[in-house]
Image (spheres, rainbow, N blue to C red):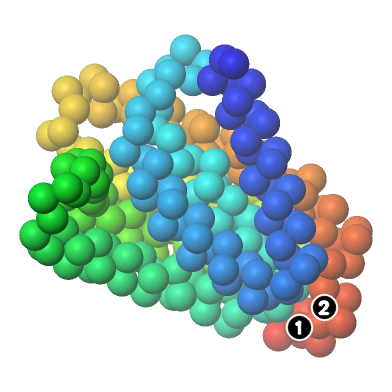
Amino acid sequence: MPNELLWIGFALLDLSLVLLVFRLFGRVGLYGLIVFNLVICNIQVLKTIHLFGLTTTLGNILYASIFLSTDLLSEFYGKKEAQRGVLLGFCCLILATLYMQIALQFAPGPNDFAQPHLAAIFDFMPRVALGSMAAYLLSQWHDVWAFHAIRAKTGERWLWLRNNASTLVSQLIDSSVFCVIAFWGVFPFSVWLEILLTTYLIKALTAGLDTPFIYLAKRLQLAPQTQTATQGEAR
């Protein structure tokens, strides 16, 4: 299957599952998705692929869907809950990185086959994780702030504007910070620049794809019992 079709299918699947988990578990489900997607996308990002004729990293879909999760938290539960989700993801990424580094220090048994494969992935992970943690915290904090700053100006109108404007700028911050810390000097400059640009473009495309999903969440009233109570807090 071509990468492009696989990418579109994966994006639609992931964004749909965000809504399903939200419907089943509410804000707790969104917290879990933030943590899960953040850890997994930091493993996937080590793989480079060709997409739409460009070189980019894998993991963009899962990372972009984190922004959908935080925007859902912002829209339904308010600014404080969205910030709590951001900080929870940040803490869990630190723990995942630390624990895998400890795991690599154990001497493997004589019949072990996993150590070199784990080392190939997770020996590089501290640099990727450092870049991801810095980029994640800065971009997500900006995303929550911008989402509510726009909402304060527009009220309940123009959900598409606060969803997209906050995410697009935040994704630019994220891609720039991450690529400098994680990949500077790892690839030739031309490849590094292509990864930076295509990473942002793919994330921006995914951000556009998530707009119908946040409208669907509003239309279906996936959290009706808390929406009215938290809209005042969100302002």
Give the structural element (helix, strand or loop) at label 2.
Answer: helix
* Residue 49, percent from left and from top: 40, 24
Give the class, few, some or many, for how many residues have Cα within 10 Å of label 2's Cα (few <14, many ≥20). Answer: some
Q: Residue at x 36, y 47 (%)?
A: 43
- Mark linked to residue 227: 2
Image quadrant in which you'd find residue 146: bottom right
* Residue 194, percent from left and from top: 34, 24
Q: Amino acid at mark 2?
A: Gln
Quadrant in which the C terminus is drawn: bottom right
Is 146 drawn above or below residue 9 in the view shown?
A: below
Left or right: where does residue 180 sit relative to residue 73? Answer: left
* Residue 70, percent from left and from top: 60, 64
Q: Residue at x 69, y 41 (%)?
A: 13
Image quadrant in which you'd find residue 175: top left
C-alpha distance separating marks 1 and 2: 5 Å
Q: Residue at x 48, y 65 (%)?
A: 35
Left or right: where does residue 92 sit relative to residue 4? Answer: left
Marks 1 & 2, CB-CB < 8 Å contact: yes
Give the structural element (helix, strand or loop) at label 1.
Answer: helix
Left or right: where does residue 62 sit relative to residue 193? Answer: right
* Residue 71, percent from left and from top: 65, 62
Quadrant in which the N terminus is drawn: top right
- Mark linked to residue 230: 1
Q: Amino acid at mark 1?
A: Thr
Give the class, few, some or many, for how many residues have Cα within 10 Å of label 1's Cα (few <14, many ≥20). Answer: some
Q: Is residue 182 visible?
A: no
- Mark linked to residue 200: none
